[in-house]
Image (cartoon, grey):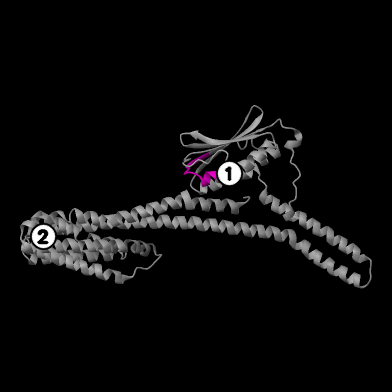
Amino acid sequence: MKELTEVIGHVRGWRRGWTERTKLQRIDLYTRVTLCALPWIFLVSWGLLPLGATLDRGPAAIALGGAFFAVNAVQCLLSNRNVSLSFAHYRGSEPFPMRRLRLPAALLAVLTGLLVALAAVGGIKDEGLALLVLDLPVAFTIPYVLLVPVRTYLLHCAAFAVALVALLAAVGVPGGLLFGAALSLFVVFLLVLTSTRPSAWSMSVMWQAEDARDMQARLAVAEERLRFGRDMHDVLGRNLAVIALKSELAVELAQRGNAAAVDQMVEVQRIARASQQEVRDVVRGYREADLPTELLGAKGVLEAAGISCTVEGADGPAGIGAPPAIQAALGWVVREAATNVLRHGDPRHCVIRLTTAAGAVVLEVENDGAGAVPEVGGGSGLAGLRERLAALGGSLEAGAAGDGLFRVTATVPLTAPRGLLSPAPRSVSPEER
């Protein structure tokens, strides 16, 4: 694929803005924010409402209820601090320092003691006990479930449930409330497990897929560099070896005063000029635009970036039947238009259409998701395309097409003078001499 390195560079730059990587970062942020907000939602609902009954149960109940709420709020803060590190630990990108769980574990034990004390002094109503039990382990278990295997998590949850139920039974909580407390613990442990682990697993898989795409792009760039290096070696290797041998021979002949040294240097000069032209041909192959190749390349690059691409009319008279000069000019249009599709907006589908109308070849590149449409006259890319097409008597139009669509239309007449349709000799820039 011609200029693969440049195209992949555009793809990677576009991904850093409006691509799947940006969307993936947003999903990741949304997931983390949700898990951080969940303990607070439990705190201000099931963790706060039952404590209202303590206002009528005496000073001891009020003090225990206030302490329970304050410790629970601190536990939520610690949970929020540990969520990101727990995600990184689950993905295997960064180990979680287990010492960070010491304080949350101690606060969980304090909360458990406060809850048992509230039940012992009758500081909460019967139905409020089940709600407080629901809220009790949420802040601690959200990061913890990502740090240990599921089997270990379930075993630890079962041990905690048995200990809590035993403590409640020891302070005289009736059997019916004990069953409700055990059921509440089962529900909250299962809720945390089924909401946190699948979310982390999904994010891990999506990040791995994104990393794989980046690695594939880097490998493609490396492969293209190797191919270019092989081409240059094949072109220059033999000729440089011949130049070296003939130069040595010319030196020896010159030292002997043999006039044949001049012939050898003339031959060196001829081979050097031929090598220079071959290098230009190789580089030109990377710089020139070929319509069939550019259509295939645009389709491949867009689909690799997650954009559905449809090419119509490539095998018809407007495609392979057009003169070489028109194909080359339209190839540049396809390349620039595909690059703009990657750079601007949030496209999902792109259509590249080649037709003939009124004695002209018409190329249309249309994509959806044109959120930030570039100015029709702006950009050096569009200006350069207009100059190329104007040399063939053609024109270029670009702009919004309604319903969130953006369309680039290039028109080149087939009735242009023969001198324009034949490929013009390429001028050699000073840098290539």
On screen, residue 125 above or below 372: below
In which quadrant is the C terminus drawn?
A: bottom right
**SS at circle 1:** loop
Q: Left or right: where does residue 382 sit relative to residue 137?
A: right
Q: Quadrant of residue 56?
A: bottom left
Q: Quadrant of residue 57?
A: bottom left
Residue 341 within the magenta-colored segment of the rendering: yes
Nearest the viewer among 234 and 336 is 336
Q: Residue furthest top?
A: 358
Q: In the image, which residues are magenta? A: 340-350
Which residue position holds label 2? 178
- The disc placed on residue 379 is 1
* Amino acid at pointer 1: Gly
Q: Left or right: where does residue 175 sit relative to residue 407?
A: left
**Residue 34: % across, % down:** 30, 53
**Residue 351: % across, % down:** 53, 38
On screen, residue 64 above or below 425: below
